[in-house]
């Protein structure tokens, strides 16, 4: 089965998420010139990201899940915080032995330190609670963990080793990454 290998090693921002998604769409839509059929049946996505924007991470997750190809994801160093969501889009998920997953609470950056109204503070609290709940529920739906256990990991600011991730089903296995001979690599 032809596989395109893609690497994402950036913080998740609206711009990096859009660029990554655009690149994945371009790669997954490449056609074999002889057969005019899709060139790739699988996207093998290597992720090392310290996380970032939660809204962008859910957008990546939802869009990747809708791709017409199989997706495999690999933790090649760090899949932290918001980066966990697109990582979960993989039908098969792996982690290198020297990698980790970091769970922590969602956070809000106020645009100004002066004059933040109570309404703005309350809105931020609602937003944070909603997305934190969504994150916990998504992780729970893809692992053996319960949503309240994931929420507790987030509250504690917990790092999960690859072995712990395998035990709870966050990854299928702990394997070292190796690019097959003749493979095509896409850096996005």
Image (cartoon, grey):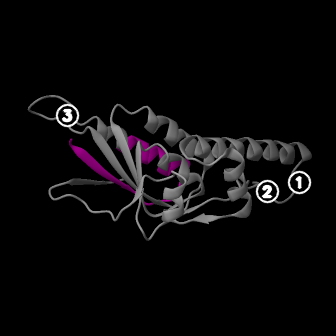
The residue stretch that appears in magenta: 1-23
Q: Which mark is residue 115?
A: 1
For numbered disc 1, what is the local secondary structure? Answer: loop
In this picture, residue 93 sits left or right of residue 36: right
Residue 31 numbered mark, or none:
3
Asked which quadrant contains residue 41, the reply is: top left
Q: Is residue 107 magenta?
A: no
- How many other residues sit within 10 Å of disc 3, few (<14), some (14-19) or many (≥20)? few
Q: Which quadrant would residue 98 be assigned to in this image?
A: bottom left
Report how many numbered discs are placed on residues in the image.
Answer: 3
Q: Are marks 2 and 1 in contact (CB under 8 Å)?
A: yes
Q: Is-magenta flag for residue 5?
A: yes
Residue 152 spot, x, y in % from top left: 72, 56
Looking at the image, tell me whether mark 3 or mark 1 is earlier in sequence order: 3
Name the mark nearer the viewer: 3 or 2: 3
Q: Residue at x 24, y 39 (%)?
A: 40
Tell me the tag on residue 112: 2
Which quadrant of the figure has residue 1? top left
**Given this view, does label 3 or label 1 mark the residue nearer the observer?**
3
CB-based contact (under 8 Å), mark 3 and mark 2: no
In this rendering, position of residue 169 left or right of residue 122: left
């Amino acid at each position: 089965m032809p596989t395109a290998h893609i690497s994402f090693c950036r913080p998740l921002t609206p711009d990096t998420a859009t660029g990554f998604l655009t690149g994945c769409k371009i790669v997954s839509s490449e056609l074999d010139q002889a057969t005019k059929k899709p060139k790739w049946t699988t996207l093998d996505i290597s992720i090392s990201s310290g996380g970032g924007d939660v809204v962008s991470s859910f957008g990546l997750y939802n869009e990747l899940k809708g791709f017409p190809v199989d997706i495999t994801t690999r933790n090649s160093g760090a899949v932290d915080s918001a980066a966990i969501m697109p990582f979960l889009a993989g039908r098969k998920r792996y982690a290198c032995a020297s990698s980790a997953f970091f769970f922590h609470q969602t956070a809000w950056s106020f645009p100004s330190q002066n004059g933040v109204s109570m309404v703005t503070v309350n809105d931020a609290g609602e937003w944070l609670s909603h997305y934190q709940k969504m994150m916990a529920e998504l992780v729970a739906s893809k692992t053996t963990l319960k949503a309240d256990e994931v929420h507790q990991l987030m509250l504690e600011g917990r790092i999960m080793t690859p072995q712990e991730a395998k035990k709870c089903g966050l990854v299928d296995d702990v394997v070292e990454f190796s690019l097959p001979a003749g493979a095509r690599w896409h850096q996005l």
